[in-house]
Image (cartoon, grey):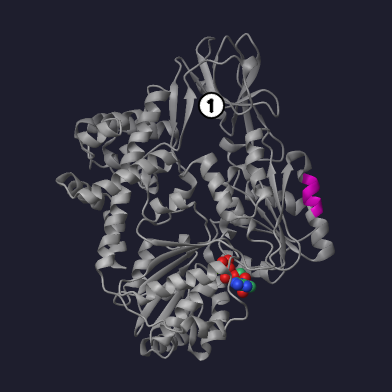
Amino acid sequence: MLNEALTSIKGIGPTRAERFAALGLFTFSDLICFMPREYRDYSRVTNICDLKQDDYAVIRVSELGSPKTVRIPRSHLTVTTVSVSDGTGRLQATWYNQAYAAKNVPTANGGYVIGKFDKRRGMKLLQPVFTSVIPGIQPIYPLVKGLNQSIIRNAVRIALNSCRDEITDELGESIRKEFSLMPKADALENAHFPQDAASLNAARRSIAFEDALLFTIMLAYIRSLRSREKGISFDVTGIKDEFLKLIPFALTNAQSRIIDEIACDMHSSAPMNRLIQGDVGSGKTVLALYAMYAAMKNGYQSALMAPTEILAQQHYKQLKSIFGEKAAIITGRQTKKQREELIGKIAEGKVTAVTGTHALIEGDVKFRNLGIVITDEQHRFGVQQRAKLGSKAATPDVMIMSATPIPRTLSLILYGDLDVSILNDMPPGRIPVNTKYVPQSKRIAMYRYIEKTVQEKGIQAYVVCPMIEDNEEMESVNSAEAVFDELSEMLSVRVALMHGRMKNAEKESTMEAFRRGEIDVLVSTTVIEVGVDVPNANIIAIESADRFGLAQLHQLRGRVGRGNMESYCFLLSDSDSKLVRDRLKTLTETNDGFKIAEKDLEIRGPGDFIGTRQHGEVSLGAALGADMNTLLEAHEAAKRIMKEDTPDCRRLIDKAKQKYERSYKDIAIN
Ligand code: ADP
Ligand code: MG
């Protein structure tokens, strides 16, 4: 049954199956492993008089009004309400654009209503559901259009029931005992349908442990395969000194240290697989230039992949200054003829240092002797894409540069297949971004300030929002579309909108227009995160900043302060929680990305960081929800198991390979 298609579940036809497919769910087994994104505790009744903002609550219904639906003038909204009292207070169960919900309101008193309490605009219970029993802890799954929680929950229930006997314990009895893990079938049951908080925690820990263990084993295995491959041994004698004469500044200590590490890797006959992490602006490009220069001096070509056209152009400028005629750029915009000519030159080895976007790895580009491949802003490049580029030569060195600082402890786990260098100081003279916490009450004043500064100083501003469009489940969050509408109306400067659902060409042309100064305020989602350089953009305002991880906020803040004027980052939040405010205050106190990442890890756990390794890459699956201790424990256990080389160990390696088969094949090529 594990491989049974979802369409064999009653109520799931081809159309609905497509929605499930959009979530990566095709079989019963996929469903069973599909972990809830969060849980809501509906296991106890709360009195209305004791409710706190944003509580998910179960309210006993002792008095019930009749539903009313009104249309809000000049908007697409209809609001349906029904008044509920429990004897301690009264509130309005409220639905937006779901007039049909009124049909499901019971006609008699008694029973319960569950939902999210919001007191900001009257006493409201949002997303209300009437029920005759207390529901207990409810799983909340990631959704796509066309699915809702109960459709998914029912499907999971059916899949679990039909497969229960087929779920096997991969880890074996002894590991399970040693680390007090639940049997797999119980763990899955409780992760989807928790009995109580304690069994939920134990279940999540058990599942995360297993995922993290297999993940670690797989990375260690890949690493051991790679170290047996034969790469190029470059002669690096004297190259650093030569290179230093070509660049206009002195290296920072960290840059110098990492160049030595790169030189050492390049000299070694095993292929380099190094990840370089450095905050935005810490000067990673020069490290790439060094490696490309060393390759050229040895008669090899090099490739530098950028995630966007704009970044590739920025790199190309620098390549020209060092490699002159031997530098080249391949983009998606060149004419067929230009491209063919360039491809010819690359194949003949007439150009040595090549940069570009995805166009660089498309089928027809063949290098004569590619010595090193560098990817910039790695999180936009999947393992698969790197593998494609890697396969264009025997075994080139691979270097990955990332601006996402990850705490050391965690990066040992996440990047166990790579050597990691940390660029932990900054070039001199950078003015830190002035970061301020802005409460809801000062929001409008802040936008007025931005308008005034734009008009008086001719600077530009970013406004970043956590979501593209409004979503009733997150009523308090300002979406990019809503803020764009609001600011277009309110401000007398040029406002534009950019988000991830726009076509690439459209995004790039908007970004281009912003760069040329034809847009004053760019409202966007986090699509601006990756290394774009607009020196005239001096202000960034981040809406609902509490929705982001600190590391991500820091990353966003790195978009400004690239010129030599003073720059500002405004963190907006309407949360009245002290915890939230304190968390955001970390950013107002330090500019060190690694310190911020440590703090983030401490407060929010490793999930956010692991998430950054997900885009088209090897995913840690359920370990996303794990705490740091579980990850470390699993990591230690994996290391021990790898050393033991027992039948248990070989079985787990096989299991890990099977689980990560697709990604593993890709990784193994490069
Ligand atoms: P990132 O790590 O974000 O890719 P870049 O490599 O783009 O950073 O460097 C940011 C800026 O700092 C560039 O303008 C670069 O020329 C400059 N820079 C890099 N290293 C140094 C240094 N050691 N001294 C002075 N300026 C430097
Ligand atoms: Mg960069």
Q: Give 193 or 304, whichever is nearer the viewer.
A: 304
Q: Residue furthest left?
A: 647
Any atom of ligand 1 within 8 Å of the CB at mark 1?
Answer: no
Against 248, residue 85 (above or below) is above
Q: Quadrant of residue 226?
A: bottom left
Residue that mark 1 sits on: 101
Indicate whether residue 268 is drawn in magenta.
Answer: no
Q: Secondary structure at mark 1?
A: helix
Q: Position of residue 279 (x, y in %)?
A: 57, 60
Q: Is residue 445 magenta?
A: yes
Quadrant where the C terminus sits is: bottom left
The image quadrant where one finds the N terminus is top left
| Residue at the image point whose x is 37% and y is 34% from the top | 205
- Residue 424 vs residue 224: left or right? right
Residue 14 seen in this snapshot = no
- Dominant SS of magenta comes to helix
Where residue 489 sits: x, y (%)? 76, 51
For residue 286, which quarter of the picture? Answer: bottom right
Answer left or right for 28 relative to 607: left
The spot of residue 68 in percent (x, y) is 63, 23
Q: Is residue 555 left or right of residue 569?
A: left
Identity, as a three-letter code, of the amino acid under mark 1: Ala
Instruction: Tell me the residue at 38%/72% (across/down).
Output: 265
Crowd tier of the residue under label 1, counting other residues whose Cα lies within 10 Å: few below 14, some 14–19, many 20 or above: some
Give, as a single range, the part of the protein colored magenta.
444-449
Residue 634 appears in view? yes
- How many marks can you see? 1
